[in-house]
Structure formats: C-alpha cells, structure tokens
Amino acid sequence: MTADVFPPRVGDRESFSAALIQALPEAAVVTDASQRIVSVNDAFTAMTGYAAAEAIGRNCRFLQGPGTDREQAAAIRRSLQWNAPFRGRLLNYRKNGEAFWNELAIVPVPGPSGPVTGFVGLQRDVTESVDDRAALLALLTQTERERATLGALLDVARLLGQEVSTDTVVRSVSEVIPELCGADRSAVAIWDGDTSRLTIASATGWPAGLAERMERVNLSPGESPELAELLVQRQPIVIGAQSSAWARDALERFEVASFAAMPIHSGGALRGLLLAYWTSADKAADLDESLSARLSGLAGLTAIALDNALLLEETHWSAAHDSLTGLPNRTTLERQLERALEQANGRAATAVIFCDVDGLKRTNDALGHDAGDQLLKEVARRIRAVVRPQDTVSRVGGDEFVILLAHVDGEPEVEDLVRRLEDALAAPLRIAGRSLSIRLSMGLAFSSDPLVHLPPSAAGTALIRAADLAMYQRKSRGASPLSGAPLGRLQRLAADLPGALGRGELAVHYQPQLDLAAGETVAVEALVRWTHPVLGPVQPDEFIPIAEMNGDIASIGEFVLHRALADISALRRDRPGLGLAVNVSNDQLDRRGFAAGIAEALRSSGMPFDALTLEITESKLPADRVVALAELSELRAAGIGIALDDFGTGYTSLAQLRDMPVTELKIDRSFVQQAVSRGPDLIVGIVGLARGLRLRVVAEGVSTAAHLDRVREVGFDRAQGFAIARPMGVAELAGFLGR
Ligand code: C2E
Ligand code: MG
Ligand code: MG
C-alpha cells in the first residue's frame, strides 16, 4: 500500500496516514489522487462492515447502490475532479446490503508544495436523524467541526512532509490544540531525559504576564501524582479543581478552570506533553471520548513529526560538524567566513588563524587512537575557552583547526589572542594517565589586505589558504612572522607561479658543502630561484609552499633535478667526486614512479647514482605514507643518498630513524646557531646519535666563523652556510670550485 497521499520525505508514510485517520472519531477514508482508497479507520469498518483489506485499492463508489441518487454521485465526482472540497449526503450500502444515509465531508490534500496528492473523507451514518431538521442541523455543525479538526490535523500532517525544525513542530502543534480541542489556550512541553524534567517549549493564546510564567515552567514528575501518572500512561487526563493541591495551585497560577494533558510517546520513550487549557468553569473540559481521541491522535502525529525533525536536525548537524569535537566543520566554516566577509563589506577586518597540532601523530603512535581523540577534544576545548564567544572554532582536518574572528580591530588584537592560545596549550595535557606536551603551530591571515576584486566565497577560501600557508611557512622555518605575505601578494604569486617555468623565470642556484676533515667542497645543494617579472626575486620559502599546494611542485621539482644534473655532470668533468643534493617535496614522493623517474634522469645524465642525495624534510616525515616509503626504499636500494633535511624541527624518534632508508642528517640551522650561543649539549647528542646509526651529519646555516669552528669541533662531517659560500649560479660555482 503505497500512495502519494502524503509525501513525508522522512519517516513512515503509512504509520502517518494510519495515525491521522485513527485519530478521528468518525469513519474516515484516505485516498490517493486517483481516488483509490489507501487507508480506512476502524470506525469506517464498524459503519460499513467492510474490513480495511476489502476497501483498500477501491474507489469509494463501491459503497453506492441502486438507490443512490445519480445526480448527487456525479456532483461528488465533479467536485473531486476539480480538487474542491465536497460536503453532502448520499445513500450508501453496507456490506450486508443495508442502505444508510452517509453524511460526507471530503477535502483534498495538497502535497507540501502544491498539487493534490489525495483526499481525506469523513463519513457519518445519519440515517436515524435524516428526517429530523433540527438534528440534521446539529449534525451539519458537527460535521463542520470535524472538518476543522481534520484541517487542524492536516496542518500537523503537512509538517511531516516538510523539512522542519523541532521548534516549528512544537509551535505548530501548540497552535493547533485550541482549535482541535475547543480549548482557550495551549502549550507543548518537552521532556528532557537527561534531567528528567519537562519544560514548556511553546505556548499559544496566553496573555503576556501568563505567557512569561508559562515559559519558566520546569516540572519534575515527582511534583504531583497527576504528573507521575501522566508520564507512564498513554491516555490524556483532565485536571480540574477536584485534583491534587499541586493541580489546584497550577490552575490558580495560570488562571484557568481546567486543563487536559496528553503524553507524547515515541517508541518506548516519553517525548513531552500536549496541554489544552480552559479558562471558564462552564467550558471546563470533561474527558469525553472525542477529546480523548483527538488528543491521542495529535500526540501520535506530533511524535512522528518530532522524530522526523530530530532526525533532520541530527543529519543537518552532522553534515555541519565534526563528530569528534562537536566543532563546526570546513563547510560550515566556509559558509560563516563568507557571511562575515559579506557583512564586513571591506569595512571591518576579518581574521583567520590556522592551527596545526604538532604531536598528534606521536600520540596516536605511542598511546593509540583513543588517546589521540582525547587530545583533539582537549585542544578543541582549550581553544574554545580562549576565543570570544562570537568567534568560530572549526576542525578542518585531522590535526587542523581554523579560528574565524569577525570584526577584529587590528593585528595586535589577534596577535595577542595567538599568544593567549599558545599559553593555553602550553600546560601539559593529561591523556590516558600520561602528561603530554603539545604545540600549536599557527598562521594568520587578515581580510584587510585588498580582497576587493574577490567575491566573498573566493575571498574566504583564499583567507584560509593564506593562513594555512603562513602556518606552513612558520612551521618549516621557525622564524617566519605569524602572518605570511599579504593576501594580494599571495594571490599574485599563486596566479603567476604555474607559468613561471614556461616563461623561464625559474633558475637553479648551488650552495657548496664543505667536507670538514678534508677542507674542500665535496658537494652542492641545488636551490631553486624565481625571479618574478614585477615583484623581483621571490624566496623558495615563500613560493615552494604555494607550489606544494597548487600541485606545481612536481614540474618544478623535475625542472630542478634535470637542470642540476646537467649542470653538475658538466662540472664533474673537472671535479669527478662532486656530489649533488636536491630537495624533494612530499607531494613528489607520494607519487608512484617517482624513484623510477629519478633513476631514468640519472642514467641519461651519466652521473653515478651515489653522487646524488635527495633531501626530504623531517617535519613532514613519510612514516605513515606507504607510497613514499616504498619510493624511498627503491631509491636507497639503487644507491641514491637520502638526507633528512631540517633535522631537529620534527619529531623523528630513534626507532623511526632506524627503520627509514636514510643516509644523512642535515641539522637545522636553528640548532647549529644555538650550539654556539647556548653550549653544545644537544648538538653533541644528535651527532652522537647519527654516528651510532652510521649516518652522515651535515650542519646547515653555518653563517659565521664561530659556527664553523664549533661544528668542526663537535664532529660534523660537512658544513653548509654563508660562512662558506652563498648559493650561486652555475657559472659562479665553476669559478668558486676552480679557486
Ligand atoms: P633547505 O633545503 O633547508 O635549504 C637551505 C636554505 O638555507 C636555503 O634557503 C639557503 O639559502 C639557506 N641558507 C644557507 N646557508 C645559510 C646561512 O648561513 N644562513 C641562513 N640564514 N640561511 C642559509 P633557500 O634557498 O631560501 O631555500 C629555502 C628552502 O626552500 C629550502 O630549505 C628547501 O626546503 C626549499 N627549496 C629550495 N629549493 C627547492 C627545490 O628545488 N625543491 C624543493 N622541493 N624545495 C626547495
Ligand atoms: Mg635542503
Ligand atoms: Mg634545510
């Protein structure tokens, strides 16, 4: 039995239709748009003698017979054809052949957004009173009331076909109660299972003072025998002056003579109460069968509508949030950012802070994913505690959070916030019985920078990317400022980078590496250079991250490799032992076939495999990247050297180092430079560790004579830095080597 009478998009159409008509005290029939019966209620079966199964699928005409007035039957058909409501009397026949006068009220049911999807008919056997004019009149009034009832129920029913919120359901139901029950005022209370209390969620028809009193209602079932009884049973009860002290007090407080309450149950669980109130003693309700049936019917519909609304809210919620931390997700962030930029309209500044949790992977590896989850939740909590209530904190990736700050006064305000965030995260976290220290790497971007030519949606994504980039740059080069290049410059660079290679704007420079024992240059590191036609020289620290995000890094990497192989092979004719180091980004490593490509390039350049070292950065180790690890192993097996660049800035553990196909550690310049000022302890340890693992140790950023003395003393194999030579073009390098 499926028919498009009511098309609830969520929930159960049949239970809906059945609940609707069972709620009616009169015989009722639901048909689809072609007037075929889809359901009937028990009162219909009682009146006609036809069971539901005998009626379903048929046209209501089957009730007609030899005595039925043709004209009248045609009138019904006509009005239904035009989707108009019909009211009238018709001679019908019961299953046992007995004729009866059927007082009919038929209304079309529009779908949620327009066309008629079926009809609902109310029927009443009026045979006994058909000759009595007064009785007929009363009957017609009665039918009129039923139609109003039906209309009210249909209002609730329509909610089932729409995507509405719990609030809307509760409000609509509350509005329907007075009409449905002939009451003066109404309310809907919602049950909170966590606190075991009822609160009024919507109230209709109350004068201002009482409405406020109503809003504060917060009941516990222990407060009165009536409430306790209500919550367990499934029938309405009426409370009048004869009830408990609690009830009398309630009547007095709300200035009513009586009220009826009907619990709303869904599945086995209590969801709330429907409440109908009568103000005067003469109207005060007594619980007749009809009121009881209406309230029960409405409660059934309300339960379905509430379930649907909740399901929808949950669906919407989970589409907009990260389930682990409960924070908004990227989609929501982008929408809110767009709105913030629209509202600011270039006048107020919007800031975005991109945060990356350093140490999540370590926690996951060491303590398991549950601990990692706990860590993320705690980080989310601490961030939330620091920002303003109006700020949006969202989780956009595994260990990435983005904070959106609308209407900020200026950079100092945000930089202050960043400092407070750093402080908040500095205190160790207690996770799985352990005390963990983590760090947030943060990057900032401001909308104040010219964004005018970007629509808010594009500006939003550009802002997030800019903050991400600033974070990334800071992370790989600790000293970078909190906010990266102005957005305008970033956009420009990002737009111009893809064509740079083709326009010949990229070049490769070489920085010599000194063998500390032999005192001579034994290798060079290839470093890419970009000369922008308008902006001039752009540092790799600025454009490599852009290339990594844009996907341009693969072609740039290939260019650097080929150029460097060609240049250095040529120089090797005079300096046969000269080695070459080339930087490789993670993106390149993650592609299958990377190792094969390198091998191919080496073969065609004629350079021996062991003269090449590839530098990969430690801060983004490929420990959990299967492809990268396989490619690295393949390279290593071919005799190519692998260096861990910027060592000391990441979190490589000894165990990881041992398991990775690495031949060299390049100690980050921050450590090398500290070694002079703060004493050698740490660096001595690192060099010792490298020796134990039979790795070559190279010091980078050796920029003064003092650094050079120190690294020699500590036992480094090689040194690289301004103190020896700056990066230079190939011609200059030839001169440098020839000296
Ligand atoms: P890196 O691989 O750690 O390269 C060393 C960086 O330190 C170079 O910066 C170099 O110019 C700089 N440097 C060398 N000696 C000193 C010194 O004494 N003092 C100071 N303060 N700095 C020194 P550069 O050329 O700006 O490159 C920055 C980073 O960009 C590189 O860091 C590398 O990670 C990346 N990079 C450069 N070329 C390429 C490339 O062709 N491919 C990829 N994937 N990354 C590249
Ligand atoms: Mg390097
Ligand atoms: Mg380095």
Image: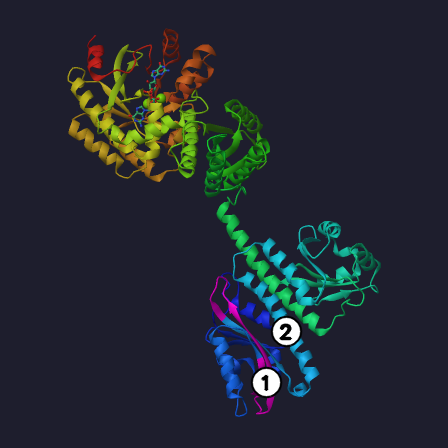
What residue is at 74 percent from the left and 54 percent from the top?
A: 220
Whole-percent x, y for residue 72 in the image: 53, 84
Q: Identify which residue, 610 or 126, lies in the foreground.
A: 126
Q: Residues within 10 Å of mark 1 (few under 14, many from 20)?
A: many
Q: Identify which residue, 472 or 61, lies in the foreground.
A: 61
Question: Which SS class for mark 2?
Answer: helix
Mark 1, residue position: 48
Q: CA distance from mark 1 to mark 2?
A: 22 Å
On screen, residue 88 versus residue 277, left or right, reads: left
On screen, residue 390 versus residue 656, left or right, reads: right
Question: Which SS class for mark 1?
Answer: helix
Mark 2 CB near ligand 1 (8 Å cut): no
Whole-percent x, y for residue 544 in the image: 33, 27
On screen, residue 259 versus residue 144, left or right, reads: right
Part of the protein shown in magenta: 88-117
Mark 2, residue position: 144
Q: Residues within 10 Å of mark 2 (few under 14, many from 20)?
A: some
Specify the amino acid type for callout 1.
Thr
Query: Is residue 595 in sight in this rendering?
Result: yes
What residue is at 47 percent from the left and 41 percent from the top?
A: 335
- The image quadrant that residue 547 belongs to is top left
Whole-percent x, y for residue 594 in the image: 26, 35
